[in-house]
Image (cartoon, helix red, strand yellow):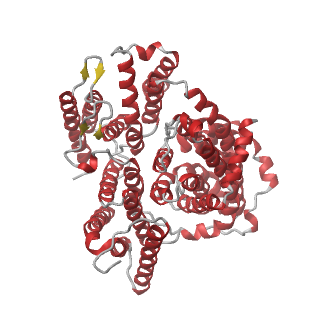
Amino acid sequence: METVSFLFAGISSALDLTILLSTILGAILGLLIGALPGLGPAAGVAIMLPVAAGLGGVSAIACLGGVYYGAMFGGAITSILLGIPGDAPAVMTTLDGYPMAKKGQAGRALGMSVFSSFIGGIFGVTGLVLLASPVAKMALAFGPTEMTAIMCFALSLLSVLGGRNIIKGFVALGIGFWLGCVGLDPIAGITRYTFGTSHLFDGFDFSIIAVGLFGLTAIFTTLEVSVDKPAASYSFRSLMPRIPDAIVSRWQLLIGSILGFFIGVLPGVGGTAATMLSYGLAKRTSSKPKLYGTGIVQGVAAPESANNSASYASMIPLFSLGIPGSATTAVLMGGLLMVGLQPGPLLFVEQPEFVWSVFGSFVVGNIALVFLTLILTPLLASALYVPIGYLYPIVVSIVVYGVFAIDFNMYNVTVAIVAGVVGLILKKLDYPAVPLILGLVLGPLLERNIRRTLIQSQGDLSVFIERPISLLFFIATLLVLLLPFGMKYLKRQKDGR
Amino acid sequence: MTLQNLDRLIAGILILFGGWLIVSGLKMGVMQGYVPGAGLFPVIIGTGIASLSVINLIRAFAGFEKLSEGMSMKSLFQAIVIIAILLAVVISVPFLGLTLSTFIAMLLVGIVIQIKMNLRSSILLLSVSIVTAVGCRLLFQGILNVPVPTGFLGF
């Protein structure tokens, strides 16, 4: 009951004109970013980070949140109309959405995509509202030992499941850890890896690295993207969600929302895996599985509800534990830090109004996106035909201005460019960027917690396995690390048969 | 240089980098009595990076490493030129100011990316660059109160 009253208070403050406009602005930009192939939610939030931070407080996070879930809505538009996924989680939507468009049912597919995104979003935001606060309350009792174990679990999950090459995932994590070491060591009081420059005394600003690693790298790696296929035809009226379609897809909506939520909570798994699993499960539990892939609304409902539910679920570890589980939530964490707030359990105690206003803006944004997507779909579809020769110069200008605005110096722009170049090399060599950025964010926290624990235990390492919660998470970490070997063993057994 | 050779080179560099982290961490001090020193974490990180990179290097030489995507020479050239343009912006801001520097950079980036340059696309690119440069200045200086650097022309 207390949660409901907090949420209503949050929705009420989210309807404040400034916050509402920020939410809508973020949602529109997110729709555009999601619709454009190449620029995903992480790149979009990273590019908008310095600009949105200028809005301050709730407005900044409402805007960045809007970009995130707006991109989740927008990704489906190009998948359905052109067969080109706007972002990775929209890949599964292409399987049935595009065949529907080719059959002349583009409007029907788009309508179902909006409706299922809304249902998944509402399910996800409800779960976020109900679970974030209790998890934060529980986390208040955690000491440095438990936090060390939770972070090890989250980072191992992320590195094992986050990329194609697990070894390279851990190397990227190590590089991120090292970047996090740069600057003044708060415990020993000495500087590390500053190479004599005063710029590095406070370490690397995480948000600048994120802009380079996700924003600029996305530009460098999508220079070959071109859109030259004709769009499928549809009428505005046909975009309206249909009740019979909603009824026929009710189980797929439920499967997608629930599965998306639980997968979204896990660090490193993310929206893409949620869409794949929910599509697979929806197909497996269907009485007519062979129809999947031929262009049916159920094939759009399952992945779309899953990726939107997952996007909100991924914010639970961020807000309640201060541990981002994906690239986008890591960048979002940068936004929270830039407005002077440290995400984690104490945020719910010290800034409850802020937290509930942000959650309220998520509810408002999710509802607003239904109308925005329906109204803007024709515009978003045509935006695809804007050549990158006009689009990327705008993005480059915003990035330069935005990064300069963080600390009012051009040194940061140089750092962002270098991060962009490093991001390009890493991407081409299959080193995932997500562990690197999370290593940079969580490395200093992990180091501090390890050292605090060892100081308290007088150097005794057994303390990490003496506490039950810590032991539980370390066992889980071990299982995650052994997972690839187990999978390989099972595959060999299967192939042997 | 092929992508495979670059992969081997980076793995080699990372082995050396890991080694350097271990040495620098040991110099900072791993443990001072019961108190973990500033070098503990770098030593752990260095050991991890170096040992995993050895595995990567072996995999790369053994041909186990299958890189997912390459990059065409044209795209690589475009990316390098865009990086150079961005670095030129950093150098030129004290003389030209941020607005003029980004305006010129936008034009150059547009020219590099555009496939066909004709009168129509040139006018369009010029218009987009002017509107964005003015818009960014108004947004950042006027609304967000960012002290945007000015150049010799006074803006």
Whether A341 is drawn above or below A320: the answer is: below
x%, y% of residue B76?
30, 61
Q: Which of the 4 image quarters holds residue B8?
A: top left
Image point 60% across, 44% down: which residue? A355
x%, y% of residue B69?
37, 51
x%, y% of residue B97?
32, 73
Query: Can residue A301 be seen from the camera position used here?
Result: no
Image point 67% across, 37% down: which residue? A284
Image point 59% across, 58% down: which residue? A74
Relative depth, front residue between A340 and A283: A340
Relative depth, front residue between A414 and A89: A414
Quarter that holds the N terminus of chain A: top right
Whether A473 is drawn above or below A14: the answer is: above
x%, y% of residue A251?
75, 41
A193 relative position to B97: left or right: left
A269 relative position to A432: left or right: right
Relative depth, front residue between A139 and A369: A139
Q: Which of the 4 image quarters holds residue A132?
A: top right
Outermost residue toward the bottom in this view:
B119
B30 relative position to A431: left or right: left
Query: Can residue A458 be seen from the camera position used here?
Result: yes
How many marks the image carries: the answer is 0
